Amino acid sequence: MTEETGTTDDERGAEAGRELSWRAESVGLAALDTDDAELVHRWRSDPVAAHHIGFWPRSLTAVRERIERDMEDDDRDDFLVLLPGGTPVGHVALTGQNLVDGTARVELVLDPGHRGRGHGTAVLDALVDLAFGELPMYRLTAETHTDNAPALAVLTRSGFTREGVSRAACLHRGRRHDLAVLSLLRPEWEGLNRPRAWDA
């Protein structure tokens, strides 16, 4: 294990030469594969992510089976997030895609060791650019606990607007939690003053 990144030699070796589906300036998105199950399982098992996103703990086998099933789902695209050197730092997805209505949801979970470094905004910007720049999406939505300040800040920096609250919509550790509902529309994305992923 390397102290600087918290990434094992096996993880770096597994990601070396990984083909990217989408590239931005500071991150790349590679199609999620069953070989990524251990990483995703570890990230989803993190107590902070489990609380803020409302993950239900699953076994490694269940995560692997879920990835296999999702690979066949035309309504979602799942990506492993890679830094320029190939270090995997998270999982991001565009789910519930409805190409007729032009709607989808965004989901993001980062490696605990790579949070707070600006990767979340870079990843979300890249996914949003994919959704609006390559797909016929018009509206993207995201949900997170109302007390998840880091996620709310990332979503706001990426141009999402808070629409409201789904009251008591999530059960976690015996308590009901409110979910903040945010959205980004294509005209709002077009008005953002930032480089696009393809400009990198």
Image (cartoon, helix red, strand yellow):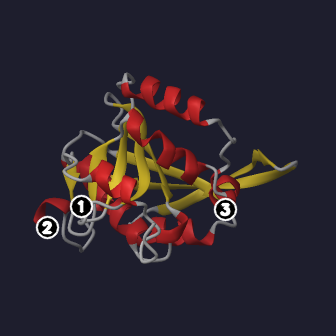
Q: Nearer the viewer, residue 37 or 99?
A: 37
The CA distance from mark 1 to mark 2 is 17 Å
Which of the two discs, 2 and 3, sits closer to the camera? Answer: 3
Q: For the view shown, which residue lies furthest in the left direction?
A: 199
Closer to the N terminus: mark 2 or mark 3? 3
Left or right: residue 1 versus residue 195 is right
Mark 2 — residue? 200
Q: Residues within 10 Å of mark 1 (few under 14, many from 20)?
A: few
Q: Nearer the viewer, residue 102 or 118?
A: 118
Left or right: residue 160 versus residue 172 is left
Q: Position of residue 20 (x, y in %)?
A: 20, 48
Q: Position of residue 134 (x, y in %)?
A: 19, 44
Which of the two discs, 1 and 2, sits closer to the camera? Answer: 2
The CA distance from mark 2 to mark 3 is 32 Å
Q: In the rendered image, is residue 128 in sight? A: no
For numbered disc 2, what is the local secondary structure? loop
For numbered disc 3, what is the local secondary structure? helix
Identity, as a three-letter code, of the amino acid under mark 3: Val
The CA distance from mark 3 to mark 1 is 33 Å
Mark 3 — residue? 48
Mark 1 — residue? 190
